[in-house]
Image: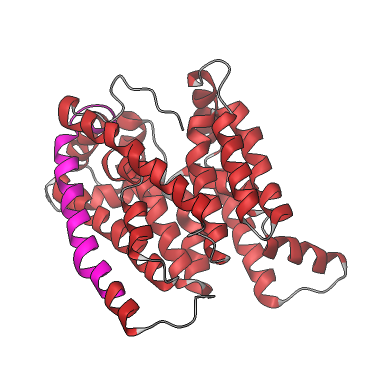
Amino acid sequence: MQTRRGWQPQQKLQKTLVYILFVPCFSFLSVLLLNLTTRGDQISYSRLYGAYKNAPIHKILEVGRQVVGSSEPLSLFLIWIGAVLSIDKHIYISIWNFVLISGICHLGNLHKLRPITIFLLLTNFYLFVLITTTERLKFAYIIGIWAIIYRGKLGLTLAAISPLAHFQSLLFLPGLVASQRLLQTFRALSRGIIKSKDFIAGCTITSAAAFTFYYFSDTLLHKATSYYNQMPPNSDLVNLAILTSIATIVTRRKINMLMMLLPMFVLAVFLGANRINMIAFSLVFYALLQEQKCEHPLILFLLTYFSVKSIPFILNIILFGDGFYNHSYLF
């Protein structure tokens, strides 16, 4: 993992402060917001949690389909565990929010991001959406973040199973296929030369995707159709274009960045830009993290925008119990 050199004692102190201040403070904030979120998707998830309390393990998928229209086995299994153990739902989900927040802080410290940058990540609009609204997608992001942290075989395994937490994780694949490492792998294949670790990684990812598509093809088709039908007419691609422009300016690997983001425009046309923007932002941040470019002024400006954008979302939670209540989001 590439990190900055010159990790001085003062920076070590900042790293410690991130753990002892940011993690508990934002974990506590997530508890408050989760308790205040009483409408929207939380209505369905509360019903699901209640239905799982007396459900046997072989009924997990069946109950999930009936209550929330979901077939992702891993996230449903994790929710079922909390229900059958009779743990209060808010406490149980808050524990997973703690794991998510801890992962973000640990990832930031590993790449020696400044505390202000980590703070902007923790006040990001998309993070508040994850901790209060999209519980299944939250599990996928937790798995993905810790996959990046652990890397190696464990990281590869975590990345491979993340779609089982939320099928939306599969939307990362078109962009990742265009990443530099896989491009190098394809070039090596064309020359008949490939490293064993690249071969194993390719086989693992391909097998996981094939397994998911084979066993959950009906659910995936239903979700894609549902997303398309819910998409507003003339779905706005301007914000995705702005993100692409900023990322291309900042990165040193401009061709790879464009190849990574171009598939997002195709997906946005069919699934809606609002749904894809979160995936695109995550891909951009991951790519720039590898280049140590996440503290470029344009990226800090973008992160500040997302932090400001979280304010009306939080106010909606406090006032109406739903962050998305009667509000139009620009990105």
Looking at the image, which residue is at 48% across and 34% down? 275
Q: How is the image coloured?
A: secondary structure
Count of numbered circles on the image: 0
Looking at the image, which residue is at 47% across and 57% down? 161
Residue 26 in view (yes/no): yes
Residue 54 in view (yes/no): no
Magenta span contains residue 30: yes
Q: Is residue 315 left or right of residue 77?
A: left
Name, please, the residue furthest toward the front: 297
Pick the front one: 39 or 325: 325
Q: Which residues are magenta?
A: 15-43
Q: Is residue 126 left or right of residue 316?
A: right
Above or below, 285 against 114 in this view is above
Above or below, 272 against 74 in this view is above
Pick the front one: 199 or 232: 232
Residue 158: percent from the left, percent from the top? 46, 63
Pick the front one: 329 or 130: 329
Residue 39: percent from the left, percent from the top? 21, 27
Looking at the image, which residue is at 60% across and 27% down? 270
Q: Is residue 8 left or right of residue 254?
A: left
Magenta span contains residue 19: yes
Looking at the image, which residue is at 54% across and 23% down? 228
Residue 323: percent from the left, percent from the top? 27, 31
Name, please, the residue furthest toward the right: 191
Pick the front one: 126 or 218: 126
- Asked where in the image residue 315 lies, by quadrant, the reply is top left
Above or below, 48 against 282 in this view is above
Q: Main secondary structure of the magenta part?
A: helix
